[in-house]
Image (tube, grey):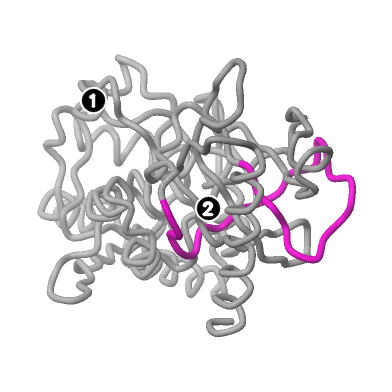
Amino acid sequence: MEYVHQTEDFKFENTVVALGKFDGLHKGHQLIFDELLAYKRQGLKSVVFSFDRPPVETLKSENYRVIYTKEEKAKILTQIGIDVLIEHPFTKGFSHLSPEDFVIKILIQKVGMKVLVVGDDCGFGYKRRGNVQVLQKLSKEYDFKLIVIPKLKLNGDIISSTRIRNLLNEGKIEEANDLMPGPFLVAGPVVHGNNLGKQVLGIPTANQVPNPEKLLPPNGVYISRIRIKEHVYYGVSNIGYKPTIEGKKHMGIETFIIDFDRDIYHKKIVVELLHFKRPEMKFDSLEDLGNQMNQDILFAKKYIEQNF
């Protein structure tokens, strides 16, 4: 997939375009992507058009976090089969484009749009004055096809990134996963830790330092699925600050991979969270910590045997 970012200098022709923030990449978004792939099979280039930072209303919150980082989003869209991801710089000039100028000067003239796919609540252009009604008018004037995808519901409520974000904040990882095509994930390289797991406890772990912009569920222990290139493993992941361990604290994700013993330092792995086991705890001793970790591993093996 071609990833266009940190530039306004691009030019494409004969494209089918999806327009949106696409933070959660949820099952509702999947309906939009399915339309892109259908037109891709007819010969158009499939393009997801988004922005390099959240829209203005989200910037008002200092604690705003994204469900997927830019790198994670690019990886998922590549796997789906999208041809191009454009993350347009959200500059002051760009934000002041009228809806009509955005469609004409950006989507038609630069992206080469022939078909546009949007959700029924889309908003774009200066002060989000653009909507489906504006697009319907412009599609007739400028001869592009408009496809509007209605909101998808599950259990009576609309599937949205906000709903997923709320579930993650509440630690309801399985409910959040039900709204997405795949489990919530954290992607990134394995970094060196203090080697305490392997050398002292006999339980080697892979450590990741999450992007500070990444939204994470509550600190605790999760049953996880780990992807290393084309290989799939299962394990136990701890999100948090390791309160039992003395020394400098930083947020991290530490994963024990079941039936795995290879050097993967600096290699990129994907950790998918499947089930919340327990909150992060401080133990009286390293021995108590090791005993609890072994119990967590036994629980994980049973959970995986019953569910996968």
Can you tell which quarter of the image residue 157 is in?
A: bottom left
Q: Is residue 3 magenta?
A: no
Residue 167 x %, y %: 27, 54
Q: Amino acid at mark 1?
A: Val
Q: Can you identify the residue that label 1 sits on?
A: 56
Q: Residue at x 58, y 51 (%)?
A: 237
Residue 66 x %, y %: 39, 38
Q: Residue at x 37, y 52 (%)?
A: 24
**Residue situated furthest right in the rendering:** 262
Residue 108 in sight from this viewpoint: no
Quadrant in which the C terminus is drawn: bottom right
Residue 282 x %, y %: 48, 36
Q: Residue at x 22, y 74 (%)?
A: 154
Nearer the viewer's eye, disc 2 or disc 1?
A: 2
The mark found on residue 284 in the picture is none
Q: Can you identify the residue that label 2 sits on?
A: 185
